[in-house]
């Protein structure tokens, strides 16, 4: 069962329109709509709601002044890293100043969304427009400030050092220095955010549904904001139509305001984000400028690497500075960079906030490292794969300590991997050796093709913990619950596979609940490729407890030593003796001594039926009734998945169009629970990577208007843009957890920009230092390279 | 501002005559989802690009977010809820999507299913190119499309096997 590519158990529901996404709930609930700032930076002079008051169906309008303390206060700074010296967060509704287009200024509640928007449209807000800070370099120049009390627009500054990199670079036989640019993109799940809240006045309790990646996080935040005991707040993530990082941020302004209004009004209230709101009111990622200095020897081995990063974190920092921390610590990848120094400055701009999007800073770090590898190869006239191999951590060097501090505050120690083997696999899969002839043959036909390679290591499965609860009921059904949420990862399938394998029951008997605080209250969330590692192991551990208990009880009933028992197909039996057997459903009955018999099965558990010593309590000390168990998995540190991608691209000599002809992925996420689902995760990640490499960018003008805030203008790949992906798997089990698994969620996206840049550079013989790369971008590069030899790259051996 | 005029809007949805009172500006997507309670049709952009809201109107795919409910009055609408033949079995297209792991979060899926159902009716054995072309108006942010393309081919096979195209 574990390791088999079984079809997903969530699919029959989702394929027949029976999914329950946020906006499918709460038919008849009041609808909320928001008045958002049209300016990137402005002072609110006044808000006039008069014209909105006679809109039919209007229920309420709220501005900052209406919000009580707690509700109206600045939102929490979720990850208070010490380097974030000037963390600033927004208020749910702006008080004096708005700092990005899309910031909420007023909330309208009405009978339905049409009417709520009618009213929102009639609310007049007077603004004094202030100059906007847009673009990383303008932020760094700090001629204008985003927050008056944040000098230099600098929210955070962090240096990590291993050895003396500047000295190592200076002393190296070869040196290079260059700049790299990566633009903004965004998670862009097809379902936007949304919140639906119900207040029960009799019980004084709140139930909130949110399209979130962390229902337990939302619950804690709401309890704190609204002054409710945690036991009076339930938060449920229903079916979620994609997350990719953006939905881990919490509480969103809307997530505080909608439940607050539901309680105040004593009515159900729902808000469903529309697409434009998602562009300007949620979060983006990626934007960085990197300056690199590298020193290396004749074999291309890096002796010193010195990287300075300017990171644009937008107008506020609710999620802290995880992204640049991940960039700086994952940048070394599968290599030993000799001495390493990385310094980042995280800057405020008058743009939408920046929080993790699948990859969470890794695509930028990998872009930096892999561009560096290619430049070293070009400089020395070496094969790009050889240069990488010369820098690899060897299989016998694990566990390998990079000497840095990872995003979880723990040392960055890689657990396992086999990078040389992986390189062989990817070269084979893409046809690396012999590509030079292929390229020449194409050239003779007037075609330009090129090959590219990219390697990465991904810290997965960060703590602090996840838990699992497993209960076998008296019909033999197995109920598994874990607190983290699902957004399409197939948790109902993979967690059931784990439980079925651990317990020895048919998978048809297992159901899995996720993201529902009523079922499991302690959890962190689904992000950072952590769900399979964290909840997978927690569920396995909980199953082992239940299994032990089942064997103990069955041992008593069968008068056998529990060590001689095993469970097959839901039946406990003596190994080698199928006649001495008892079904788990009966064990479940026996596990719960009863006073009342409500059916035939229950009769067997009443005090008259159950034997046992009259001098012992029916539930022995240290035991609990019921065939159930709960356990947690809390790792000392992260696991480290790895992978290598390669691509062959063709560029049109005239139109500069870039086409991906072949794409290959080799991936190591430790033991795979379900290879089909792992493969799906990779495909989806690569597609997002292709978007980031060739199409997706957030185009802000100098006044801070997002010019392409629609699916018409923000170009996400359709089926026609994504290449066929060939995948190979390598499984080096993690020694850190019982199941030996790492994570797979983000892997596909991480090296794609690096790979495409490498391949286009190879096809064109022009330096590619900025992504994404559009046809017109490449066209302009060609023109510049025609007159500037510094932009040209010598043809590489492969 | 007094209430806007509402109209009795009636159409055949998944073979059943359904009606509700709604104003002239009600989108077909909202009408299906909120007035009729058929929430299987999803809304991803509300501006005609993502294809999540695709339903079949008189058998042809339309974007229900770009269609006013009132203009669909009197027409035959098929939504994802109506794709299965009704005997409890999934349609070949639905079956193929499960077999080939053609969905992850499932949000884009109803739009793909409707699009592909019409595509295979018009072209029962599409080439790779024709499949790409046929689904090139639907966005999916999860799957990378490779398994969706495989699902379409698989569905074509299943339909051919069943012999009657139903
Ligand atoms: S919701 Fe209709 S096309 Fe996107
Ligand atoms: S399956 Fe999630 S958008 Fe397609």
Image (cartoon, coloured by chain):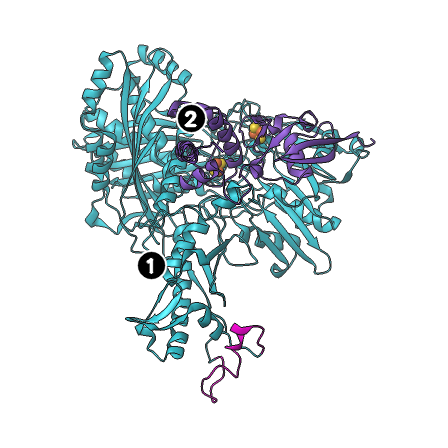
Instruction: Check the residue under mark 1 and report the chain it is in.
Output: A
Residue A322: which disc?
none
Q: Kindly indicate which chain is depicted in cyan in the rendered structure.
A: A
Image quarter in which the C terminus of chain A is found: top left
Q: Position of residue B113 (x, y in %)?
A: 50, 34
Q: Position of residue B118 (x, y in %)?
A: 51, 28
Instruction: State the SS at label 2.
Output: helix
| Neighbourhood count class around disc 1 (C-alpha, 10 Å): few under 14, some 14–19, many 20 upward | some
Q: Position of residue A678 (x, y in %)?
A: 37, 43
Residue B138 placement, left or right of A428: right
The structure residue drawn at horizontal position 66% and vertical position 53%, both measured from the top left corner, is A226
What predominant SS class does the magenta segment belong to? loop
**Would you name the residue on which mark 1 appears?**
A738
Q: CA distance from mark 2 to mark 1?
A: 43 Å
Task: Tell me, yes or no, whether the highlighted magenta stretch contains residue A607.
Answer: yes
- Extreme residue toward the front, this view: B164
Q: Kindly indicate which chain is depicted in purple in the rendered structure.
A: B
Check mark 1 vs ligand 2: CB closer than 8 Å? yes or no. no
Residue B131: which disc?
2
Residue span colored magenta: A596-619
């Amino acid at each position: 069962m574990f390791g088999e590519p079984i079809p997903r158990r969530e699919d029959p529901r989702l394929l027949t329109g029976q999914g329950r996404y946020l906006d499918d709930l709460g038919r008849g609930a009041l609808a909320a709509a928001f008045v958002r700032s049209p300016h990137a930076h402005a002072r609110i002079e006044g808000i006039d709601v008069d014209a909105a008051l006679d809109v039919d169906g209007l229920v309420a309008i709220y501005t900052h002044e209406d919000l009580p303390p707690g509700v109206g206060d600045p939102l929490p700074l979720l990850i208070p890293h010490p380097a974030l010296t000037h963390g600033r967060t927004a208020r749910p509704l702006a008080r004096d100043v708005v700092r990005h287009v899309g910031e909420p200024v007023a909330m309208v509640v009405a009978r339905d969304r049409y009417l709520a928007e009618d009213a929102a449209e009639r609310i007049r807000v007077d603004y004094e427009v202030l100059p906007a800070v847009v673009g990383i370099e303008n932020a760094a120049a700090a001629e204008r400030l985003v927050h008056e009390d944040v000098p230099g627009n600098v929210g955070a500054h962090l240096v990590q050092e291993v050895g003396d990199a500047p000295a190592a670079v200076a002393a190296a036989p070869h040196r290079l220095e260059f700049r790299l640019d990566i633009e903004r993109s965004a998670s862009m799940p097809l379902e936007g955010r949304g919140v639906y809240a119900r207040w029960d006045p009799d019980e004084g309790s709140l139930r909130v549904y949110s399209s979130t990646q962390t229902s337990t996080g939302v619950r804690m935040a709401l309890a704190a904001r609204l002054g409710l005991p945690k036991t009076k707040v339930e938060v449920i993530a229903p079916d979620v139509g994609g997350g990719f990082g953006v939905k881990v941020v919490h509480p969103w302004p809307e997530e505080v305001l909608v439940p607050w209004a539901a309680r105040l009004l004593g009515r159900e209230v729902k808000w469903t984000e529309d697409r434009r709101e998602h562009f300007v009111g949620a979060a983006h990622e990626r934007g960085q400028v990197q300056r690199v200095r590298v020193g290396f020897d004749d074999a291309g081995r890096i002796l010193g690497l010195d990287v300075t990063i300017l990171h644009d974190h937008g107008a506020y920092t609710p999620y802290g500075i995880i992204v640049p921390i991940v960039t700086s610590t994952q940048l070394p990848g599968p290599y030993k960079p000799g001495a390493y120094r990385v310094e980042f400055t995280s800057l405020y701009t008058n743009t939408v906030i920046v929080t993790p999007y699948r990859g969470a800073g890794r695509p930028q770090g990998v872009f930096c490292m892999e561009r560096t590898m290619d430049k070293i190869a070009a400089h020395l006239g070496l094969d790009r794969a050889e240069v990488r191999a010369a820098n690899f951590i060897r299989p016998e060097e694990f566990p390998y300590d990079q000497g840095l501090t990872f995003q979880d505050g723990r040392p960055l120690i890689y657990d396992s991997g086999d990078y040389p083997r992986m390189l062989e696999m990817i070269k084979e899969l893409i046809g690396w050796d012999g590509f030079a002839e292929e390229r020449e043959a194409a050239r003779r036909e007037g075609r330009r093709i090129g090959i590219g390679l990219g390697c990465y290591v991904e810290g997965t499965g960060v703590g602090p913990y996840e838990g699992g609860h497993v209960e076998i009921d008296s019909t033999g059904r197995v109920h598994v619950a874990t607190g983290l949420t699902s957004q399409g990862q197939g948790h109902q399938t993979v967690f059931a596979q784990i439980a079925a394998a651990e317990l020895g029951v048919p998978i048809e008997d297992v159901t899995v609940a996720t993201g529902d605080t009523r079922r499991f209250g302690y959890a962190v969330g689904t992000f950072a490729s952590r769900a399979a590692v964290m909840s997978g192991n927690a569920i396995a551990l909980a199953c082992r407890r239940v299994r032990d208990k089942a064997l103990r009880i069955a041992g008593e009933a069968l008068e056998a030593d529990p060590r001689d028992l095993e469970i097959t197909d839901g039946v406990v039996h003596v190994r080698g003796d199928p006649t001495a057997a008892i079904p788990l459903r009966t064990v479940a009955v026996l596990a719960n001594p009863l006073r009342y018999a409500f059916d035939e099965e229950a009769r067997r558990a009443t005090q008259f039926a159950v034997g046992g010593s009259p001098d012992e309590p029916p539930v022995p000390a240290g035991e609990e009734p019921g065939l159930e168990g709960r356990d947690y998995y809390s790792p000392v540190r992260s696991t480290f998945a790895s992978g290598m991608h390669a691509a062959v691209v063709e560029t049109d000599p005239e139109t500069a169009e870039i086409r991906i002809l072949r794409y290959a992925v080799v991936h190591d996420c430790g033991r795979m629970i379900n290879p089909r689902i792992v493969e799906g995760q990779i495909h989806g990640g690569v597609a997002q990577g292709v978007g980031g490499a060739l199409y997706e960018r957030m185009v802000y003008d100098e006044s801070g208007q997002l010019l392409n805030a629609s699916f018409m203008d923000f170009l996400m790949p359709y089926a026609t843009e994504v290449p066929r992906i060939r995948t190979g798997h390598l499984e080096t089990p993690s020694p850190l957890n019982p199941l030996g698994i790492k994570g797979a969620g983000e892997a596909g996206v991480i090296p794609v920009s690096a790979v495409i840049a490498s391949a286009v550079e190879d096809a064109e013989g022009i330096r590619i230092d900025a992504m994404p790369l559009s046809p017109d971008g490449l066209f302009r590069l060609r023109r510049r390279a025609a007159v500037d030899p510094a932009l040209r790259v010598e043809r590489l051996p492969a | 501002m007094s209430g806007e005029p509402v109209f009795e809007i009636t159409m055949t949805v998944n073979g059943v005559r359904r009606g509700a009172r709604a104003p002239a500006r009600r989108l077909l997507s909202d009408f299906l989802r909120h007035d009729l309670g058929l929430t299987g049709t999803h809304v991803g952009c509300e501006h005609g690009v993502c294809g999540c809201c695709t339903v079949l109107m008189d058998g042809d795919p339309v974007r229900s977010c770009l269609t006013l409910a009132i203009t669909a009055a009197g027409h035959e609408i098929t939504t994802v809820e109506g794709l299965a033949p009704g005997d409890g079995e999934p349609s070949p297209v639905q079956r193929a999507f499960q077999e080939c792991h053609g969905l992850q979060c499932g949000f884009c899926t109803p739009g793909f299913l409707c699009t592909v159902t019409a595509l295979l009716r018009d072209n029962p054995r599409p080439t790779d190119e024709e499949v790409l072309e046929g689904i090139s108006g639907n966005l999916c942010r999860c799957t990378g499309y490779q398994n969706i393309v495989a699902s379409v081919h698989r569905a074509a096979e299943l339909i051919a096997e069943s012999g009657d195209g139903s």
